[in-house]
Image (cartoon, rainbow, N blue to C red):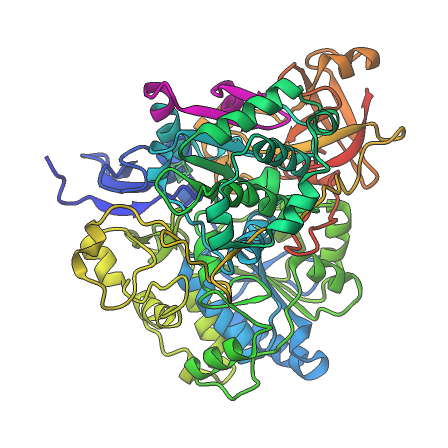
Amino acid sequence: MKDETQIKTLCPYCGVGCGLEVVPSQGKGAWQVRGDRAHPSSQGMVCVKGATVAESISKDRLLHPMWRESLEQNFRQISWEEALDKLCDRLQTVLASQGPDGICMYGSGQFVTEDYYTAQKLMKGCLGTNNFDANSRLCMSSAVSGYVQSFGADGPPCCYEDLEQTDCAVIVGSNMAECHPIAFNRLRKYHKKTPHVRLIVVDPRRTQTADAADLHLALRPGTDIDLFNGIAYLLMQWGFEQAAFIQQHTSGYADYAEVVRHYSPDVVSDRCGISISDLETAARWWGKSGRVLSLWSMGLNQSSEGTAKVRSLIDLHLLTGQIGKPGAGPFSLTGQPNAMGGREAGGLSHLLPGYRFVANPQHRAEVEHAWNLPAGQISPNPGRTVWDMIRGLEAGEVGLFWIAATNPAVSLPDLVRVKAALGRSPFTVYQEAYFPTETAEFAHLLLPATQWSEKSGTMTNSERMVTLAKAFQPAPGEARADWEIFCEVGRRLGFAAQFPFQTAAEVHAEFVKLTQGRPCDMSGISHARLEQEGPLQWPLPSGENPESQTQPAKRLYTNLQFPTPDGRARFSASHSRGLAEPPDPDFPLVLTTGRLYGHWHTQTRTGRTEKITQMYPNPFIEIHPRDAEPLGIVEGDVVEVRSRRGWARFPAKVTRAIAPGTVFVPMHWGALWADHAEANALTHPTACPDSKQPELKACAVKLLPI
Ligand code: SF4
């Protein structure tokens, strides 16, 4: 029987974007969470994070604005009035002394789209600096630049129904079983009951995902492009390329074929550390399958050649015509719950709302007009990425650093350097739901923010499905929604006309107008419609038939027309460059980092959830016996791991699940949760030249038993 008091919302953790129902707990005075069977993306399924989210909401909340003159002092509670005065005074001081580019904001894929949009309007429109970046830079920016370069626009072309309609799924650099568990459940169920379906997993670790595969390619870190070009070599040699598709719908094939001819099976086998037989099996399954779906996440994105890796994988789809039809296509798995919404709202330092670019004069003019700002107000220069913000702090070029809903003192690479830079910031505002966090250590002004369950807003998941997450309980203490804080600051700085919004629905209504006619057109979506009809997938232009939401899941490029000037998808022609920091005699092992099933990022929520902390009481390092034995390391020994940048200590797990020459450490533990167990004390910031996404997935280390 339907519970009339249930509230439909979505899980605020990962980009799978599962629907949740919140139900009052009979007689207990608290509420419970369960999967929403009507949500098209998740069909009632939910993982441990979604199921336990309620537990994390009430603990360790930042309830009031807090202030201190210097990092040596303790915080003292102040009023919102005083907090906003201090913030606006500082903004105006920096504007006058350093200009708009002295201001930086670092936001989050945990924002709702309304938060993202108002932050863009404040920073890029009103203040005139593009120095807004989000933690999606660490997560999805290589997928963004890969899609843009190959197809002419961002946007995953696939949908979750493809998981149940493919003949061959190729998962690359993603422990999907642990990191996107509900999407993986859909694929695994289908794989189990459909005998002809092939599942290939490419990963240096034998993860839970790899355990479910028909073929696991445990390649050497950094050799993904070698593998993709090697598969292409065999597909071409065996005649699997789709000549008519290539001729009618792509460009750049000749250059691609010239690159691929260098990747013969013996070369690729040697570089990747896989057998020729396994390479041939992967190529044969790809070539013979009617519908091929590739899925990837951080293993490709977090790389100094992330864009090239993404494009090389897309090339295989273009070579074989595997796109624009059910069960086929390149499908990036989004990390954060609303990294997709951030991309739509322009939430990276080179973007503007509606999949526009700050470097494009027409795009700037369209946004300036929509925002009722004078021509030329938006800077033509891409702003600082988050790593450029760190460098700006080091150089004394940042006068105000505004961080919201993210924890860079754990999540950025090269943490020793990051913490030193944060310590030099003359004025750091930290807008956050929780206290303490590791980043709060470096803040002068703390602004309490509401979060999931306390504010209304929309989020877009990996398959472009937009869900409304409504507020259903009061804000704790004096916490305010992020978008309300951005609007209030804008009004105090003299931009009342730009920030008339009273509700998140009004913000959303203005935002979707800026998507009209764009590749991510969602001008037909509104809060009212989402509330009435449930989640809606874009593209959904204004005026589209109201019944359209009942149509089957949508794919992009079904007409094989791509948003490039000539309508064709572009082959890349990339040679593999390998790791930015390969192992050498001084640092002979490759460290790779990743996530565990229950935890989320830096544990700001999951570290406060008993069931999850019991699942994972401690960090650890996985070491292959062949690497452990010469050092005398046995299971449980504490091992010191050193890179060129720092050190950390972890209990050893000696296991054949990791390839020899590679070690694995989970990235969840910051200084708040364990002593010297920070994976990012070891990692380096060298980034992809196109996406600017750092190579968090690989650095050279050595082990010292202690
Ligand atoms: Fe939440 Fe992701 Fe788990 Fe779904 S798979 S319940 S969105 S954490």
Relative to residue 493, is residue 310 depicted above or below? above
The residue sitting at the bottom extreme is: 374
- Picture quarter containing residue 691? bottom right
Measured as percent of width and height from the top left, residue 16 is found at 41, 41
Q: For residue 200: magenta?
A: yes
Relative to residue 474, is residue 575 depicted above or below? above
Q: Is residue 559 left or right of residue 265?
A: left
Residue that appears at 75% across and 39% down? 579
Q: Evaluate whether residue 564 shows in this view.
A: yes
Measured as percent of width and height from the top left, residue 112 is found at 41, 57
**Residues in magenta, as a range:** 190-216
Q: Nearer the viewer, residue 560 or 210?
A: 560
Q: Nearer the viewer, residue 416 or 182?
A: 182
If the picture is divided into quarters, which one holds ligand 1? top left
Residue that appears at 61% across and 41% down? 300
Q: Quadrant of the C terminus?
A: top right
Measured as percent of width and height from the top left, residue 258 is found at 69, 45
Q: Nearer the viewer, residue 367 or 613?
A: 367
Q: Nearer the viewer, residue 695 or 305?
A: 305
Relative to residue 704, is residue 490 depicted above or below? below
Q: Evaluate whether residue 217 shows in this view.
A: no
Residue that appears at 36% across and 49% down? 555
Relative to residue 85, is residue 336 depicted above or below? above
Q: Quadrant of the N terminus?
A: top left
- Picture quarter containing residue 370? bottom left
Q: For residue 552: magenta?
A: no
Measured as percent of width and height from the top left, residue 580 is found at 77, 43
